[in-house]
Amino acid sequence: MVWISENQNKIITLFLISTSIFSLILTLYLINYSNNFEEKFSFHNIIVGLTFVSVCFIGSMASIFPSSCGKIVSSKVINSQNTTHSLEKSNSRGHHYQCENYSNHILKIRKNYLCATCSGLLTGSILGIIGSILYFSGYLQVEIIPILAFMGLISVIFGLFQSIIPKTNGAVSRFIAGILLVLGACILLVNLDQVRNSTVVDLFFIAISMFWIFTKINLSQREHKITCLNCSIKHCENERNSMD
């Protein structure tokens, strides 16, 4: 297990946020770039479609196994003067502590407790897979509508940075943000495919969208850390249960 200090984690988060903002600006530029690349490879639709489906699948795995994926971009244990919490939670609901501070992270459906963000990412990934298969197989005809690119961009921005947008910290907002992150990426990919007509550009964008998934995971993990660090309980019941 590689341990990451808090300062290193802050640097990683800052890098991910900065790169995500830059990639969003670059995507907007590519969509509005006047020249057409015309660089389609043979089997363009198969290559691009399968690659995006693969990224959506990775996103769905990240939502199903958040703890394993989260270790890639975050440290394992939170330490402060007030509390010490292990991120390995055995006493959990929707992989969150059974704690009031995490109540707005959890969707309750009947007797089931689900992580709102992960459920949104999983739903969005499924819809993204369906949409990309329909589009790249030719069953879904799409016209170039400028407003769609704008809607896709706004969707990705909200999906990425929902956790730091004021008054959007409810479970429903987190669920919607997870869906919009993937659907927004799918909309942008379709728009880029229409206006740029380039396999290289499409694959480059898909690489960017995969990077957004890791940014989302990192920001979500960091929000969990802040929640525990701001907790007034020095040694909470969740910590003891996770260490038993």
Image (cartoon, rainbow, N blue to C red):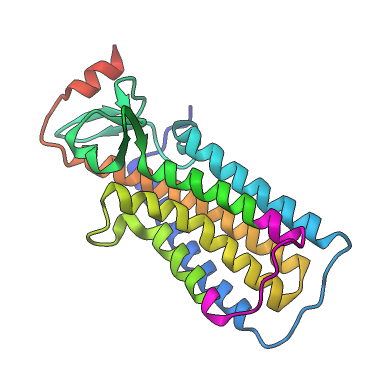
Q: Is residue 133 magenta?
A: yes
Q: Position of residue 48 (x, y in %)?
A: 74, 58
Using the rendered view, name the quadrant where residue 67 is placed.
top left
Q: Position of residue 228 (x, y in %)?
A: 22, 37
Using the rendered view, name the quadrant where residue 6 is placed.
top left
Residue lying at 66% horizontally and 77% vertically, measured from the top left: 143
Front residue of this view, candidates 146 and 143: 143
Q: Position of residue 124 (x, y in %)?
A: 51, 50
Q: Is residue 133 visible?
A: yes
Specify start and end residues of the magenta stretch as a single range: 132-148
Q: Position of residue 122 (x, y in %)?
A: 50, 43
Q: Is residue 90 magenta?
A: no
Horizontal side, residue 209 vs residue 142: left or right: left
Front residue of this view, candidates 129 and 205: 129
Residue lying at 71% horizontally and 52% vertically, measured from the top left: 51
Horizontal side, residue 119 vs residue 6: left or right: right
Using the rendered view, name the quadrant where residue 198 is placed.
bottom right
Front residue of this view, candidates 180 and 69: 180
Residue lying at 82% horizontally and 62% vertically, measured from the top left: 44
Most distant residue in the right direction: 42
Above or below, 69 against 177 in this view is above
Residue lying at 39% horizontally and 54% vertically, measured from the top left: 176
Q: Is residue 11 visible?
A: no
